[in-house]
Image (cartoon, helix red, strand yellow):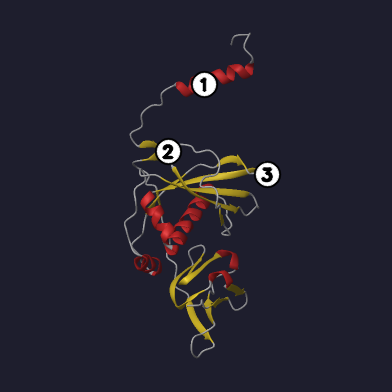
Amino acid sequence: MDPSVTEEEFLRQLLSSNDKQPEPHDPERKSLLPKPGHCIKTRTSTDEKVFINICTSDQIPAPRDISEDELEKIVQSEDPTKFRVPMSLGVPHAELDKGGKGCTVFDVVINKQFYDKTQRSQAFDLFFLTLVFDGLENKYDMTFSRDTIVLKNRKFFGKMAEQTIRTKSKPLIMEMETGEEPSLQIIREPPEGRPDFLVAQIDLPKVKSAKTVDLDVGGDKLILLAHPNVYFLNTNLPFKVNSAETGAQFHRKTKVLTVTMPVADD
């Protein structure tokens, strides 16, 4: 080491020279630069802030094209043909939030065609998010809250970085276990004529806490996922409902989720 060069300058030069060295070619790996899709904000079980960047790349293969009905049958089947969704789960990287506090960011990359499908379909979106959370939790031994917020004004949080993915050997596949369809009863209020409300009563005997349940109500659809892959419900409602005024309560003793949905005006 040149005595006229400080230790900090020497380390900087060393890192710079290392960056210029060509990496050996690995035929079983390739690099990709993901494109931003949208960003999800959540927290860990220890209340640490986490952002998940959902990104796309044409270098990630698309899963086979199936309908919502096929997806529902696969999830409900006792011995389903696995629906495989290739994805790349990036390593966590530390960033600063807008308040200057540290947070953890994960980049998840999927095929652009499948990403577009999740944006059009509530069922596929919930299914995909389940795969993402289960995959990150299993890979990094963490637990995430399912209470999420999609950032409206940011498609990507932190710095965009290349990912290295395998092309052989270890497949980039996440699989979802089967979830049984829970018992459902829909009550009209009033029972005669056009109702003002629809009340859905869903039996969830295996659910311990409402925090493990994702509920999505919109238009004439009600979709429910209970984690970890316990229940899956995708049902059509007899009338379109007002999702903004819909309320839900979970009774811990009876294990019944009651969803009250005002019927939308024609």
Residue at disc 2, secondary structure = loop
Whichever of callouts 3 and 2 sits on the residue coming sooner in the sequence is 2
Q: Earlier in the sequence, mark 2 or mark 1?
A: 1
Name the residue rendered at 36%, 44% in the picture.
Answer: 58
Residue shown at 57% from the left, 57% from the top? 148
> In terms of secondary structure, where does tag 3 sit?
loop
Horizontal relation, residue 66 to residue 43: left or right:
left
Kind of residue sitting beneath label 1: Ser
Which of the numbered marks, if any, corresponds to residue 33? 2
Q: Please name the amino acid that badge 2 sits on.
A: Leu
Relative to residue 253, is residue 127 depicted above or below?
above
- In the rendered image, residue 250, in percent from the top left (x then y), is placed at 60, 73
Residue 151 versus residue 21: which sits nearer the camera? 151
Q: Mark 3 sits on what residue?
A: 99
Residue 69 in sight from this viewpoint: yes
From the viewer's perspective, is 242 left or right of 5? Answer: left
- Marks 1 and 3, how far apart at CA: 31 Å
Spot occupied by residue 21 in the image (x, y as percentages of width and height): 44, 21
Quadrant location of the N terminus in the rendered image: top right
Q: Residues within 10 Å of mark 1 (few under 14, many from 20)?
A: few
